[in-house]
Amino acid sequence: MSVDLERADRTLIIRMNRPHKRNAIDAEMTAGLDSALNTFEDDPDLWVAVLTGTGDIFSAGTDLAAGSGGRTGRGGEYGVIRRTRRKPLIAAVEGRALGGGMELVLACDLVVAARTAAFGLPEPRRGVIATCGGLFRTQRALPLNIAKELLLTGEPLPAERAWQLGFVNRLTDEGETIPAALELATRIALNAPVSVRESLVALETMNSADDAEAWQVTEAAMAATLSSADTAEGISAFLERRTPRWSGK
């Protein structure tokens, strides 16, 4: 399986486990993430979850060769992106969270990252755009000009800089994100679950009030991009491991 689960008291650790593909998300992983988060939401004994990767990679995002599968009924893209949750989800990031991997982090509530981690949206280097919430969640989580830099240059944001900007809640040494995330989860689980749940729901309701319009804008941008010659060229160049030749068409 490409998604592993581990219980630690009241916390569920959800680990993307496809390291040979840099934890790129295919249909099997989407199904696994959806099932894991369904389990988390439906089990009254689980109060917090931690989403993480393997070794030195969180996730490289969508598997461009195989595709990530369709949206799931409860979670949307990747089984995570459009999910309405009532319990906290912590991202524990070692290595790089790129493209859809970054969008997974943006869908979480708290972020723990190693100093060697980095966050990025390299979609423009592939001739595509961030279609899983990145276009609008990035500018909610980061200053507007930093969000523009990520979306326009495709260059990664180092974890230490992300921590300085308030995107990362806990900055750790390499290999220490899971213990730090579990410590944060334990602090949350000391509190009344109803209070935590209702606070999270209220915050998310206010923060995502314009999501319907944001998704419409994203879908319009996606339609314009996918019909371009540059998208076909970008994906071909990536799969063929060569420099793309952009036409601007």
Image (cartoon, helix red, strand yellow):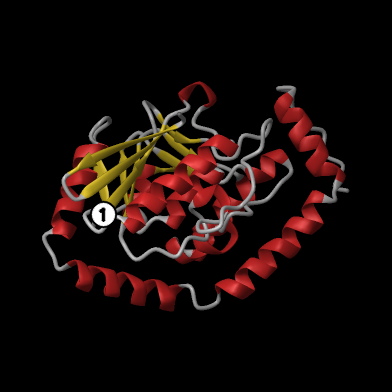
Around disc 1, counting alpha carbons within 10 Å, would you say few (fewer than 14), some (14 to 19), or many (20 or more)? many
- On screen, residue 73 above or below 122: below
- On screen, residue 238 above or below 246: above
247 sits to left or right of 185:
right
Q: Position of residue 12 (x, y in %)?
A: 27, 45
Nearer to the camera, 165 or 107: 107
Figure label count: 1
Nearer to the camera, 23 or 160: 23
Nearer to the camera, 6 or 103: 6
Residue 148, picture quadrant? bottom right
- On screen, residue 212 above or below 46: below
Residue 110 appearing in the image: no
Q: Assign the N terminus to one quadrant of the image.
A: top left
Residue 158, picture quadrant? top left
**Looking at the image, which residue is at 35% across and 33% down?**
116
- On screen, residue 150 above or below 98: below
Q: Position of residue 60 (x, y in %)?
A: 53, 35
Q: Which residue is mark 1?
A: 48
51 sits to left or right of 33:
left
Q: Position of residue 229 (x, y in %)?
A: 87, 43
Residue 243 appearing in the image: yes
What SS does tag 1 mark? strand
Nearer to the camera, 95 or 26: 26
**Looking at the image, which residue is at 20% across and 66% down?**
193
187 sits to left or right of 210:
left
Q: Position of residue 222 (x, y in %)?
A: 73, 56
- Residue type, label 1: Val
